[in-house]
Image: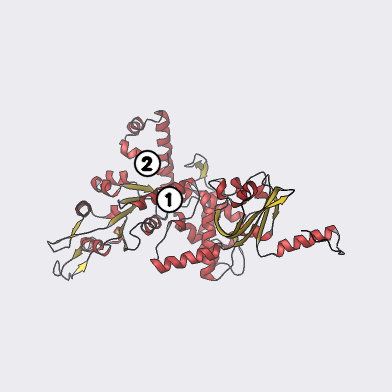
């Protein structure tokens, strides 16, 4: 009902009053018509979603937000079906990959007995939800879960989906990916969402184990097994009922890999210096930062051990292969270090965004996080990260790419700038495989023969490059 009393305000003045109310309200308001055009989209709603009116130009709600079905959008249900929602929580994602959580009131608006619009009144609880989840994780076991894997690119979501499927069983999992891509995050997430979640999660970097002590550390020791040896449980016993993560498993001596294989096959472990076998119930997750076929060929990984641990093999993509995820990753790191440093940095400048997206990221996500942390260390009261805040070493590298780097073909077929030797070799490998597959009409066996490698090796490389 519109108030019909007398007042001294003209229509333009009443319009200004309305606009002022929309700006000052602490709740997000969105109103759309039956064609899904925005009628009202106030400042608070734009802040909640980190979007503008321009993001909705000639786009429907399904184009702007990453809903799988129309039924997932309560606003569309209101405008099309007349469904009303009261004080309900909703999780959704905008087209930039930002995760949003709100408590909504959504209702259709009628005129002349028909629906002419639908309104949404939203309270932002995104940060509160995130803090609750983080506190809950700390209370439980302090391990990562899948909702902490940031990114909505096809490259990363495919790996997440396969990893989630692996939570249903206790089969061994091998996670392959470059340093800094988040392999342990995936390993912890698989454990956290499996039936073993309440049991131990034990992690060991095999490359950090001294070769003279490694067997005792893995399998345990009895007193007198060697000089100074004491009665001590090994990693398998410590992980009983849970998960044992063996990071960089190809760093284990080949002789020890044979003993590890026997333990996995027989599900029994014998402490060093003892003859007594002990049954174990442990799930193995292993990681590698190089391709398994290459490690097997170089005698760094036993082929029979690979078949045992690689029942499920996941390839985590490098950051340069999923650059659309840089923006949500940056938002996550800004939130993290805002809490740590008690700052209020809310975004990066367009120039910084260009640098981040043009860089080849040899250190992957870990390197990106260090760049953001380093930049925030150089800030005072500023709210925007500018180029001047970036760490010197990063600015120098990206300056070189912009001014002196020689252009060359990237992994995605587009032109990129000269990077590390490792990246250039990867790009050459990608180009050769792609050409061989093209020449063979997609026949993997024929392409492998042309390249002078085994069919299995080519399949691993194709999986790595998502071919």
In the rendered image, which residue does mark 1 sit on? Answer: 160
**Quarter of the figure with residue 271:** bottom left
Q: Residues within 10 Å of mark 2 (few under 14, many from 20)?
A: some
Name the residue rendered at 40%, 36% in the picture.
Answer: 433
Determine the CA span between mark 2 and mark 1: 20 Å
Closer to the camera, 98 or 281?
A: 281
**Quarter of the figure with residue 246:** bottom left
Q: Is residue 158 left or right of residue 385?
A: left
Closer to the camera, 308 or 22?
A: 22
Closer to the camera, 68 or 215?
A: 68
Front of the two marks 2 and 1: 1
Give the image location of residue 240, x and y in percent: 26, 62
Q: In this rendering, is residue 403 above or below 221?
A: above
In the rendered image, which residue does mark 2 sit on? Answer: 461
**Quarter of the figure with residue 434:** top left
Please, what secondary structure does the residue beneath circle 2 have? helix
| Residue 145 visible, this angle | yes
Q: Residues within 10 Å of mark 1 (few under 14, many from 20)?
A: many
């Amino acid at each position: 009902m519109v108030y019909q009393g007398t007042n001294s305000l003209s229509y333009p003045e009443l319009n200004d009053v309305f606009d002022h109310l929309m700006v000052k309200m602490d709740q997000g308001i969105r109103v759309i018509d039956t064609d899904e055009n925005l009628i009202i989209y106030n400042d608070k709603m734009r802040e909640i979603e980190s979007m503008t009116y321009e993001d909705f130009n000639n786009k429907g709600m399904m184009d702007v937000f990453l809903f799988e079905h129309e039924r997932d959008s309560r606003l569309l249900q209101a405008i099309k079906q007349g469904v009303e929602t009261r004080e309900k929580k909703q999780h959704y994602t905008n087209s930039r990959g930002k995760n949003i959580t709100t408590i909504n009131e959504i209702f259709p608006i009628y005129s002349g007995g028909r629906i002419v619009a639908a309104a949404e009144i939203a309270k932002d609880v995104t940060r509160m939800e995130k803090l609750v989840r983080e506190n809950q994780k700390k209370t439980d076991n302090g391990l990562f879960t899948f909702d902490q894997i940031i990114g909505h690119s096809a490259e990363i979501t495919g790996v997440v989906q396969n990893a989630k499927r692996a939570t249903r069983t206790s089969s061994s999992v091998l996670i392959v990916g470059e340093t800094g891509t988040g392999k342990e995050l995936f390993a912890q997430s698989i454990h956290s969402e499996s039936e073993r979640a309440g049991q131990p999660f034990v992690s060991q970097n095999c490359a950090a184990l001294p070769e003279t002590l490694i067997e005792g550390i893995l399998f345990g020791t009895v007193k007198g097994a060697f000089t100074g040896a004491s009665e001590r449980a090994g990693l398998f016993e410590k992980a009983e009922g849970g998960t044992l993560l063996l990071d960089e498993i190809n760093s284990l001596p080949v002789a020890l890999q044979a003993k590890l294989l026997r333990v996995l096959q027989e599900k029994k472990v014998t402490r060093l210096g003892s003859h007594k076998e002990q049954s174990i119930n442990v799930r193995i997750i292993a990681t590698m930062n190089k391709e398994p076929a290459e490690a097997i060929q170089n005698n760094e990984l036993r082929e029979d051990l690979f078949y045992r641990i690689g029942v499920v093999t996941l390839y985590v993509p490098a950051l340069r292969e999923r650059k659309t995820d840089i923006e949500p990753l940056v938002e996550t790191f800004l939130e993290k270090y805002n809490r740590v440093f008690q700052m209020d940095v809310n975004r990066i400048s367009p120039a910084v965004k260009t640098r981040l997206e043009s860089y080849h990221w040899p250190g992957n996500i870990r390197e990106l996080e260090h760049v953001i942390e380093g930049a925030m260390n150089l800030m005072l009261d500023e709210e925007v990260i500018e180029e001047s805040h970036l760490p010197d070493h990063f600015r120098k590298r990206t300056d070189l790419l912009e001014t002196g780097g020689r252009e060359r073909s990237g992994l995605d077929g587009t032109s990129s700038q000269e990077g590390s030797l490792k990246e250039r070799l990867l790009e050459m490998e990608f180009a050769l495989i792609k050409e061989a597959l093209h020449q063979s009409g997609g026949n993997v066996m024929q392409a492998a023969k042309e390249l002078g490698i085994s069919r299995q090796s080519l399949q691993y490389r194709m999986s790595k490059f998502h071919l």
